[in-house]
Image (cartoon, rainbow, N blue to C red):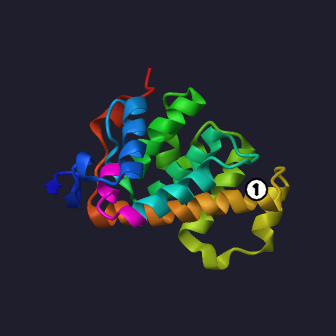
Amino acid sequence: MTTTPFSRYPVPDLASLPDDIRTQIETVAEKTGFVPNVFATLAHRPDEFRAFFSYYEAVMNNESALSKAEREMIVVATSAINQCLYCVISHGALLRIFSKEPLIADQIAVNYRKAPISARQKAMLDFACKVAADSASICEADFEALARHGFSDEDAWDIGAIAAFFGLSNRMANLTGMLPNAGFYAMARG
């Protein structure tokens, strides 16, 4: 194991990892052209790596009324609240890819209320940001606001689960000092 500049904790060599984790990392690296630092950093603890990415798959790739771009909007907006550089940059890249809009991630990270998104998406982000920053005050009025924009209670669960999961992700990225890969910054910008 070696300490790297993108994580405060030792990062295992790819060859030393359990087969399932190594295969998962290699698959992602083939798609992106690099190993995202979140994979390398969390591989420090294999059982937690498996649990983290299993839940990631469950909330980000389940059957839902939310589009892939909307899910990434939630990640970017809530990660900005939590001041998570890694997630704002890496998921900002995914948002640009899924939305096919090169400016949207920056706009949402800075102030989603002024971003050129629909009223429905603003309501979604209002709810997600409340989950991220003040979940104890969520009340029936918050669900009613979502319903006025066509969101069901199951959609609210999806929005909240993404915001809550990335609360964990943001805190782990900040704890470990995880930095975004340089490759994320230029993705889908033009």
The residue at which mark 1 appears reads as 155
Q: Is residue 69 above or below residue 19?
A: above
Which span of residues is magenta-colored? 39-47
The rendered magenta stretch, by its main secondary structure, is classed as helix
Is residue 71 shown to the viewer in this render? yes
x, y percentage for residue 60? 60, 50
Residue 175 lies in the magenta stretch: no
- The residue lying at 46 percent from left, 41 percent from top is 92
* The N terminus - image quarter: bottom left
Q: How many marks?
A: 1
Q: Is residue 80 above or below residue 48?
A: above
Which SS class for mark 1? helix
Amino acid type of disc 1?
Asp
- The residue lying at 59 percent from left, 58 percent from top is 162
Question: Residue pushed farthest front?
Answer: 19
Residue 169 appears in which quarter of the rendering?
bottom left
Residue 42 lies in the magenta stretch: yes
- Rate crowding at label 1 as few (under 14), some (14 to 19) or many (20 or more) other CA atoms within 10 Å: some
Q: Which of the two residues, 98 or 38, is positioned nearer the viewer here?
A: 38
Question: Residue pushed farthest top?
Answer: 190
